[in-house]
Amino acid sequence: MMKRMNLVLAGTVLISGLALGGYALSSDAVLANEKAENQSGITYKEAEEIAIRETGGGHILQLERDRDDGEDHYEVEIHKDGQEYEFDIAADTGEVKQRKSERIDDEDNDDDDEGSKLPADALSTDEAIKRALEEVDGTVSEVELDKEDGQYVYEIEVETSKNDETTIDIAAVSGEVLEVEMDD
């Protein structure tokens, strides 16, 4: 009788373990699938290339993937020849949904330091993103290029699997990680 009860108990534990393991695996698969769906369509690099093609050059100051009215899109800001260009690009198709341009005023010009250009040996946006994701695992939500203390710096925001936001500052020329800041 005792032997039979041990067999039933062992069988119950085994079945429970298999069920929980299967649930954990299916949950991971669902999360991975949701992440893939959320990041489908064109890449940051492709959005950057589309905007640069539209302006015929310039340098990217801001590149952000956003969701408005249920649609993912990239917001891209470029400065070229004293003009500021802003684009909304559909994340699924790469179609330019909106384009604005305006003359850069003195205040914007001071921030950008229009006289200086991003060095040729600087990291591309994709290289900076790759470097940031080596520091923190997650999904990039925003990339911004600023000039701080005389050097260009990529500020990259990453959403982690725990829905925390981490900001990574990367020197555009050296690729050095300058700061990693986790928001609570």
Image: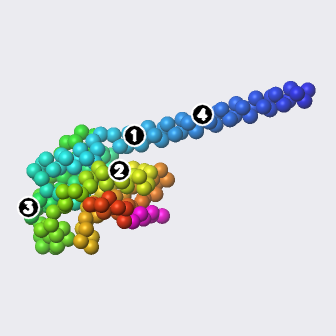
Image height of 63 relative to 153, above or below: above
Position of 113 with respect to 29 (left or right) is left
Of callouts 3 and 1, which one flags the residue occurring earlier in the amino acid sequence? 1
Q: CA distance from mark 2 to mark 3?
A: 29 Å
For marks 2 and 3, give the one nearer the viewer.
2
SS at badge 4 = helix
Question: In percent of the image, x 14 and y 56: which residue is there?
Answer: 58
Of callouts 1 and 2, which one flags the residue occurring earlier in the amino acid sequence? 1
Q: CA distance from mark 4 to mark 2?
A: 32 Å
Q: Is residue 130 magenta?
A: no
Kind of residue sitting beneath label 3: Asp
Category of crowding for the residue at label 2, using alpha-carbon neighbours closer than 10 angstroms: few (below 14), some (14–19), many (at least 20): few
Q: Which residues are magenta?
A: 179-184
Category of crowding for the residue at label 4, using alpha-carbon neighbours closer than 10 angstroms: few (below 14), some (14–19), many (at least 20): few
Q: Which residue is mark 4?
A: 22
Kind of residue sitting beneath label 2: Lys
Image quarter for residue 116? bottom left
Q: Is residue 182 magenta?
A: yes
In x, y percent, where is residue 136?
A: 43, 54
Of callouts 1 and 4, which one flags the residue occurring earlier in the amino acid sequence? 4
**Which residue is nearer to you in this view: 100 or 139?**
139
Q: Which residue is mark 3?
A: 81
In x, y percent, where is residue 162?
A: 49, 53
Q: Are marks 1 and 2 in contact (CB under 8 Å)?
A: no
Q: Which residue is mark 2?
A: 130
Q: CA distance from mark 4 to mark 3?
A: 58 Å
Res 73 visible: no
Q: Are marks 3 and 1 in contact (CB under 8 Å)?
A: no
Kind of residue sitting beneath label 4: Gly
For marks 3 and 1, give the one nearer the viewer.
3
Question: In percent of the image, x 25 and y 68: which residue is there?
Answer: 151
Q: Are marks 2 and 3 in contact (CB under 8 Å)?
A: no
